[in-house]
Image (cartoon, rainbow, N blue to C red):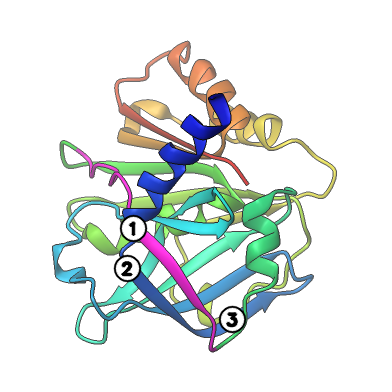
Amino acid sequence: MANSLKKAVFNLMEKAFTHKGFVLAVRKWQPESMYEIDLHLPDIDMEKWTTIPRLKCKVSEFEYRDYTPATWDVQKRICTLYIETEHQGDGSSWTKNLSAGDTMLCSAAHAAPLPARTGKILCLGDGSAMGHFLALKQLTNSINYPFEAAVFLNELYTPPASFTAVNPEFKLMMQPQAKSLEILHQFVENKMLSDYSSIYVTGYIPMVQGLRKILRNAPGLEAKVFAQGFWS
């Protein structure tokens, strides 16, 4: 009975996956744990993406993962996903097997909000937060929302020039064998948190939970904290 009910629930979920995406290109940051995926979504109106969008993607039988389009071209309906595969899981396995010409099924997931008030934005996250922060940057302007992002990476990547040239606001902290929570905590301790009106904490769920708790107890914090966790 339980298995029949579970199957019925998953069948209902499958019907929600009405959008088909076409993989145009897959690029890897050496040493091949960070993937950039160009995706054509012909039947999605990206002009309606006025908050941080997310796509729920089918990664295997009855397994789904949420990914944030990092950048997108409204006219061409092409977006780029950044997927970090350092943690083992169904999403990481799916990503590693993608290649140009593949198709995928997806649906719209809950969007994440933009800052409620103007002022400086501080973003804190790990590699899985890359798309989230890039989308936030695209949806805000640097005059009203000065932007700063600290991203912990557990690999010694060689970021492509196409990324570093246009994203000077990103501080990539590459420290193999270190723990993301500890490194981001150290980074926060050297910041004047009262300077920020919004703080985004995004990434692997245990890290997000720990850092959010630290921020709650931080002296001088008046910023609105937005937290978003992901599984691999």
Prevalent SS, magenta region: loop
Q: In this view of the protein, can residue 54 be seen by the observer?
A: no
The earlier-in-sequence mark between 3 and 2 is 2
Residue at horizontal 32%, vertical 68%?
19
Residue that extends furthest to the front in the rendered view of this protein: 1
Residue at which label 1 appears: 107
The stretch in magenta equals 101-115
Q: In this view of the protein, can residue 130 be seen by the observer?
A: yes
Is 206 magenta? The answer is no
Q: Residues within 10 Å of mark 1 (few under 14, many from 20)?
A: many
Q: Position of residue 99 (x, y in %)?
A: 62, 82
* Kind of residue at disc 2: His
User: Secondary structure beneath disc 3?
Assistant: strand
User: Label 2 near label 3: C-beta < 8 Å?
Assistant: no
Quote the CA–CA distance across marks 3 and 2: 20 Å
123 or 132: which is nearer to us?
132
* Kind of residue at disc 1: Ser
Residue at which label 2 appears: 19
Q: Is residue 177 left or right of residue 3?
A: right
* Kind of residue at disc 3: Val
Residue at horizontal 60%, vertical 36%?
187
Residue at which label 3 appears: 26
User: Label 2 near label 1: C-beta < 8 Å?
Assistant: yes
Q: Position of residue 162 (x, y in %)?
A: 52, 82
